Amino acid sequence: MTQIFEELNNQHKNIVTLIHMIENQIDRVANEEMPNVSLLLDIMQYLTRYVDVSHHPTEELLIARYEQSEAPENHEVHECKLQHRQLLGLGREFLAIVEAVREEQLVERVEFERVGREFIQKQLDHIDLEEGKVFPVLKKSLNKKALKEVREELAQSKDPLFGDIVDKEYQKLYDYIIRSA
Ligand SMILES: [Fe+2]
Ligand SMILES: [Fe+2]
């Protein structure tokens, strides 16, 4: 019944793929080249619409179970929840900057880079925290029954990019990922 953690780890791999694609685009900006704005928009939309509303809430359901149990308070588990809020804010901030670039508004290159790099670094640090510290604690404390109940509570939200069926909205991004794999 560790399937739920396998799924979360797989989603992490997909997120890391997207983070590296964002990094390439930030490097372009740093080199005074034009970024691929529509690619960045698709990635940021996926990260803020799907990851923030499905991946993180799944983790939070597991954390809530942990907190309801007799398990001792754990600093890293608490930190993980705080980081979800930060990532949500930073993701929206970077998405707004990318949208401003699309609208051809004046965006400072340093600002684009600063927010973009902070966002991708926090995403990577967050995944490290979860895989290195948080998931092992949750796995150890949550029994099969708790994991089964979390699974039942989960909204049936299908992954529109890496799931069985690619949503039309993300077809271009999907093709790009396949081409650059
Ligand atoms: Fe998370
Ligand atoms: Fe995660």
Image: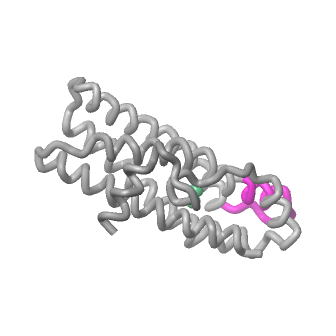
Q: Is residue 172 left or right of residue 168?
A: left
Q: Is residue 75 left or right of residue 128?
A: right
* Rendering coords of residue 130 (x, y %): 58, 65
Q: Which of the image's four quarters has the N terminus?
A: bottom right
Queried whether the magenta region covers residue 24, the answer comes back as no
Q: In this picture, is 139 found above or below 14?
A: below
* Outermost left residue: 32
For image coordinates 28% across by 31% down, the residue present is 102
Q: Ligand 1 falls in which quarter?
A: bottom right
* Rendering coords of residue 177 (x, y %): 36, 60
For image coordinates 83% across by 65% down, the residue present is 148
Q: Which residues are magenta?
A: 61-74
* Rendering coords of residue 73 (x, y %): 74, 60
* Quadrant in the rendering for residue 20: bottom left
Q: Which of the image's four quarters has the C terminus?
A: bottom left
* Rendering coords of residue 154 (x, y %): 75, 53
